[in-house]
Image (cartoon, grey):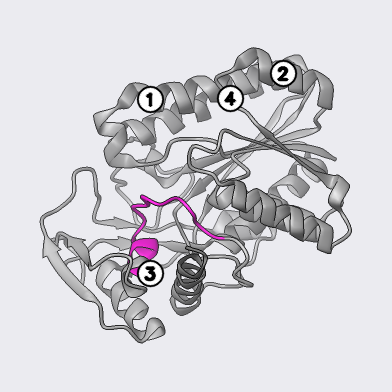
Amino acid sequence: MNILVTGGAGYIGGHVVKQLLEETNHKITIIDNLSTGSIKTVNTLKEIAKHVNKENNLSFIEADLSNFSLIEGIFKAKNFDAVIHFAASIVVPESVKNPIKYYMNNTVNTTNLIKLCIENNVNKFIFSSTAAVYGEPDEIPVRETTPTNPINPYGMSKLMSENVLKDCGIAYKDFKYIILRYFNVAGADIKIRIGQRFPNATHLIKVAAETAVGKRDKIYIFGTDYPTKDGTCIRDFIHVDDLADAHIKALDYLTENNKSNIFNCGYGKGYSVLEVINTMKEVSGVNFKVEITGRREGDIGVSIADNTKIKKEMGWQPKYDDLKIICKTAFEWEKKLLSES
C-alpha cells in the first residue's frame, strides 16, 4: 500500500512509521510541518529504512496541512491508498487559552484532509483521537460506547473530527475509517532510537524523566485531593510501541474487514501520579525533588480504558504493559537526548 502519514516526524507518528518500515512493505510518505516534530526523527527513520533495505519506501515532505493547494497537489501526484493522520495540536491547557488554534489545526485541517481523501478515492483513514473526547466519564473503565462529553477545546476539536469521519462514512459508502482513542501515551522505542523530542512537553512520564536526568530541577504534582487511593490523578499509560502496533493492526483490520470502527487504546489499568514518580525514581536511581501544588485546570481524577474491544476485534495484544518498562525507556531516551546536546 501507499500510505500518507501526517505528523510522521512527531512522537507517535514516528513510532508508527518505524514499525511500518520494520514490519511491512508499504510505501510511506510523511507530511510534517516540523512545528513539534523533528527532522532528527525523520533522519533516524531514514536510517532505519536503510537498515531494513527499504530506503525507497520512505519519503518526507515538509508541509503544513493548512496549505490546501499544496496538499492537494501531493494527493494528485502520490495516489495514496490510506492515510494515518497524527498532525494535531495536543496541549489541553493551551487549547483552553487558544481554542481557535485547536479548531483550525485539528478540526478544519482534518476536514480538509478527509475531503481530499474522498475526492481522490483514498478509502482508508486512521485517525488519532483521544480519551479527552469522554470528558469526565460516568463509568470507569471507559468503553467505546461511553457517552462523549469533552470538557476542553482539545477534546472537542477531536470529537468534531470524529463526527466528520462518521458523517462521511455514511455519505460515501467506500470511505472507511478507524478512530483510535488514545489514553496516556508514554515511553520510547524499545531500542531507544526515537522518542519524544518536543522540548516543552507536559506529559507526566516525559517530565519525570527530564527531572531524573537533571533537565528540570523538580517535578510538580498538581493536586493531592482527588478521590483516589493517594489523592493524585490516575491515568492509563500505554507504551508508544504498543500504541504504534495498534495502528498497524488497524490498517490490517480495514483491509480485511472493510468497515469503520472505533477503538480505545489503553491497558485497562491505571497508575497514580505518585506511583509514576516513585517508579521513575526507582528505574533511574535518582531521588529527584517533588513539589506539591494545586490542581491544574481541566484535569480529571481518573481515566482508564476498557480495552476489551480492541483485543477481541483487532487481535491487539500489548507487549510492554509494565510501568517500569515505560519509565525505563523514557529515562534512557532522555539520557540519549542529553548526550546529543
In the rendered image, residue 204 lying in the magenta stretch gets the answer: yes
Q: Which residue is mark 3?
A: 209
Q: Earlier in the sequence, mark 2 or mark 3?
A: 2
Question: Nearer the N terminus, badge 4 or badge 3?
Answer: 4
Q: Of the residues tagged 2 and 4, which is closer to the observer?
A: 4
Cα–Cα span, label 2 and label 4 = 16 Å
At 51% from the left and 25% from the top, the residue drawn is: 163
Residue that label 2 marks: 118
Q: Using the image, determine if residue 43 lies above or below residue 339.
A: above
Q: Which part of the image, by quadrant, shows the N terminus?
A: top right
Instruction: Indicate the amino acid at tag 1.
Output: Lys
Which residue, given by chain and number where applicable, does mark 4 sit on? 65
Q: Are marks 3 and 1 in contact (CB under 8 Å)?
A: no
As drawn, 140 above or below 165: below
Q: Amino acid at mark 4?
A: Leu
Residue shown at 32%/71% (left/top)?
214
Q: Quadrant of residue 92?
A: top left
Q: Looking at the picture, does residue 182 appear above or below residue 234?
A: above
Mark closer to the chain start, 3 or 1:
1
Q: Amino acid at mark 2?
A: Ile
How dense is the environment of label 1, judged by Cα within 10 Å: few (below 14), some, or many (20 and up)? some
Q: CA distance from mark 3 to mark 1?
A: 29 Å
Which span of residues is magenta-colored?
195-208
The amino acid type found where label 3 is placed reads Ala
> Magenta stretch: residue 293 in it?
no
